[in-house]
Structures are given as structure tokens and as C-alpha cells.
Image (tube, grey):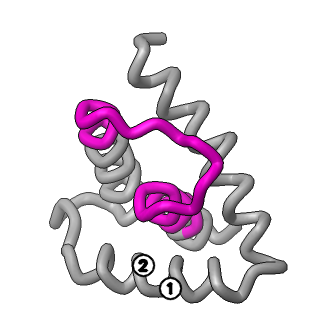
Amino acid sequence: MDDLSERLSLLVRDIGEAGVAEMAGSPALVAAVDQHAAEIRDMRLAPGRSQTEALLGYLHEFTEEVFRRGWRPNGTRDWEFVRIVTICWMLRQASGS
């Protein structure tokens, strides 16, 4: 597994999945995710691909970009954190989980 794929897997597990689970008790996080989800839906990701494929592609591109500019998860709920949680939540919705 290459370094980016490994970091992406860790982000999904440690930030995305944990953040999605945390949404159950955090109305503020739910509201932030809702705003990000609306923005992502408006982006019309990868026409012709399934929603899951488009979201996975976006997650990969997004994380690659934020790592390239030096972002690292640091326990705060910054914009990048919420965006990753949102994409993971949308992936769950797309798969019916």
C-alpha cells in the first residue's frame, strides 16, 4: 500500500468513521456536515460515475490536496476534518448503511 493510500485508509477509519459516529451526539457537527454535504452535492462530482465512485474519487483528491499543503489531523474540528467526515457520511448514505 502506498503512503497516500495508507493515510487515506487511516483518515477514513480515524476521522471519518469516528466523526460519523460522533454525529449522533453532536448537533453542531450534524449542522456542519449538512452544510458541507450541500456544497459537495452542488459540485456535481464526476458525471457518469456512480455516487460512491465519485465520492471516493473526491475523497482521494481532497486528502491528497490537503496533505500536499501540509494539513495534518490534530484533534480539532477544522474545515478539513468536517469535510472528511462529510464525505464518509455521504458514502454511508450512498451505500445504504
Using the numbered discs, state the Cα–Cα distance from disc 1 to disc 2 in whole angstroms: 5 Å
Secondary-structure class at tag 1: helix
Q: Position of residue 4 (x, y in %)?
A: 39, 23
What amino acid does circle 1 point to? Asp
SS label for mark 2: helix
Whether residue 61 is visible here, answered yes or no, is: yes
Q: Within the magenta stretch, is there residue 80?
A: yes
Residue 8 pos. (x, y %): 48, 33
- Is 58 rendered above or below residue 44? above
Residue 56: where, in percent of width, then height?
39, 49
Tag 2 residue: 37
Q: Which residue shows up at 20% across the image and 74% down it?
A: 43
Judged by its main secondary structure, the magenta piece is: helix
Classed neighbour count for the residue bearing mark 2: other residues with Cα under 10 Å, few (<14), some (14–19), many (≥20): some
57 vs 37, left or right, is left
Residue 19 location (% of width, % of height): 68, 60
Kind of residue indicated by mark 2: Ala
Q: Nearer the viewer, residue 59 or 52?
A: 59
Marks 1 and 2: CB-CB under 8 Å? Answer: yes
Residue 46 is labelled as none
Q: In screen coordinates, is 22 left or right of 45?
A: right
> Picture quarter containing residue 83?
bottom left
Tell me the number on the disc at residue 34: 1
97 left or right of 78 in image:
right
Which residue appears at 44% of the width and 24% of the height? 5
The residue lying at 38 percent from left, 39 percent from top is: 71
Left or right of 14 on screen, residue 41: left
Q: Is residue 75 magenta?
A: yes
Residue sitting at x 50%, y 27%: 7
Q: Which residues are magenta?
A: 64-89
Q: Is residue 39 above or below residue 87?
A: below
Picture quarter with the C terminus:
bottom right
